[in-house]
Image (cartoon, rainbow, N blue to C red):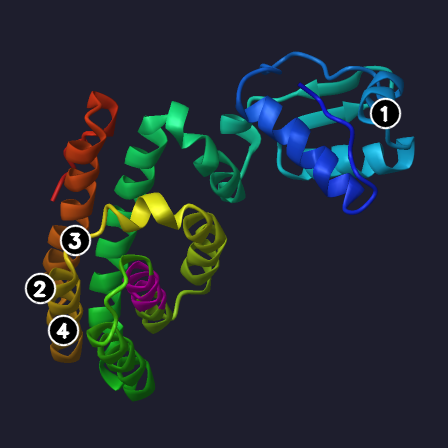
């Protein structure tokens, strides 16, 4: 249900409410949002704030605003971008397949950036030193959430070694969403000693320029997280789907 909005962050709060209703399916693709006059009355906001919020939703690919047609809900799987992941993750309790898909993406992306970094990182002494520093920090961390965050930063640093700007922007896009959902995802990480050994093994493969070895090490580690999610969730939808080698 729509709720009155406080004065601070008015447009953002309006957008959050409407975004959740759309992503939850309460406004399905093809349907229209209530007219602006009705929405502003129910939310107790002015029309200018409401229009700003609707523009935010349009930017996310959730709605289309047309003069004479109102605000129509779009199929966000056809029109949305990766930034929607961070808004979908909090709804994942009712969409366990989203966690499975996120972990599958993480596995594919992690495997490929490890392979690419192994091929390109030989001369990047600073980049390799950054990986070693992150691995050293992981050796001193016992908290699961903090170790998970370090592991994520480790893979961001690997992406930086690839020298591909699009890959860096891609991983930056999902970073906030992953961090906002860290309590669940941290529980899907492997034991601390496994994480630390993984970091050292992967650094060694990168230093050697071992493309196949780096891909295998990353893939085995990230597959373990996906399989753990399937076991802990107890739901068939969480079981990882097979991937080609």
Q: Earlier in the sequence, mark 4 or mark 1?
A: 1
Question: Which residue has dot 2 on it?
Answer: 213
User: Which label sits in the foreground, 4 or 1?
Assistant: 1
Of the pair 176 and 183, the residue shown nearer to us: 183
Question: Which residue has dot 4 on it?
Answer: 200
Mark 4 crowd level (few <14, some 14–19, many ≥20, 10 Å Cα)? some
User: Answer yes or no: do the residues labelled 4 and 2 have beta carbons within 8 Å?
Assistant: no
Residue 141: in sight, yes or no? yes
Q: Is 149 colored magenta in this rendering?
A: yes
User: Which label sits in the foreground, 4 or 3?
Assistant: 3
Question: Which residue has dot 3 on it?
Answer: 190
Report the side of 172 relative to 74 (left or right).
Answer: left
Q: Residue furthest top?
A: 31
Mark 3 crowd level (few <14, some 14–19, many ≥20, 10 Å Cα)? some
Query: Which segment did they paint magenta?
Result: 146-156
Report the side of 74 relative to 82 (left or right).
Answer: right
């Amino acid at each position: 249900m729509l709720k009155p909005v406080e004065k601070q962050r008015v447009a953002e709060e309006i957008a959050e409410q409407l975004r959740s209703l759309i992503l939850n399916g309460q406004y399905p693709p093809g349907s229209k949002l209530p007219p602006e006059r009705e929405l502003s009355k129910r939310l107790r906001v002015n029309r200018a704030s409401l229009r700003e919020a609707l523009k935010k939703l349009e930017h996310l690919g959730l709605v289309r605003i047309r003069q004479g047609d109102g605000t129509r809900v779009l199929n966000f799987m056809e029109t949305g971008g990766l930034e929607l992941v961070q808004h979908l993750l909090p709804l994942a309790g009712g969409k366990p397949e989203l966690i499975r898909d996120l972990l599958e993406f993480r596995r594919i992306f992690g495997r490929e950036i490890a392979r690419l970094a192994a091929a390109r990182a030989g001369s990047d002494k600073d980049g390799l030193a950054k990986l070693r520093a992150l691995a050293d920090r992981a050796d001193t961390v016992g908290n699961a959430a903090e170790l998970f965050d370090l592991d994520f930063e480790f893979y961001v640093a690997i992406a930086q070694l690839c020298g591909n700007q699009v890959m860096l922007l891609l991983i930056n896009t999902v970073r906030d969403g992953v961090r906002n959902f860290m309590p669940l995802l941290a529980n899907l990480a492997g034991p601390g000693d496994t994480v630390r050994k993984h970091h050292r093994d992967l650094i060694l493969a990168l230093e050697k320029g071992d493309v196949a070895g780096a891909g295998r090490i990353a893939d085995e580690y990230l597959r373990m997280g996906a399989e753990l999610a399937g076991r802990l969730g107890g739901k068939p939808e969480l079981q990882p789907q097979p991937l080609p080698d």
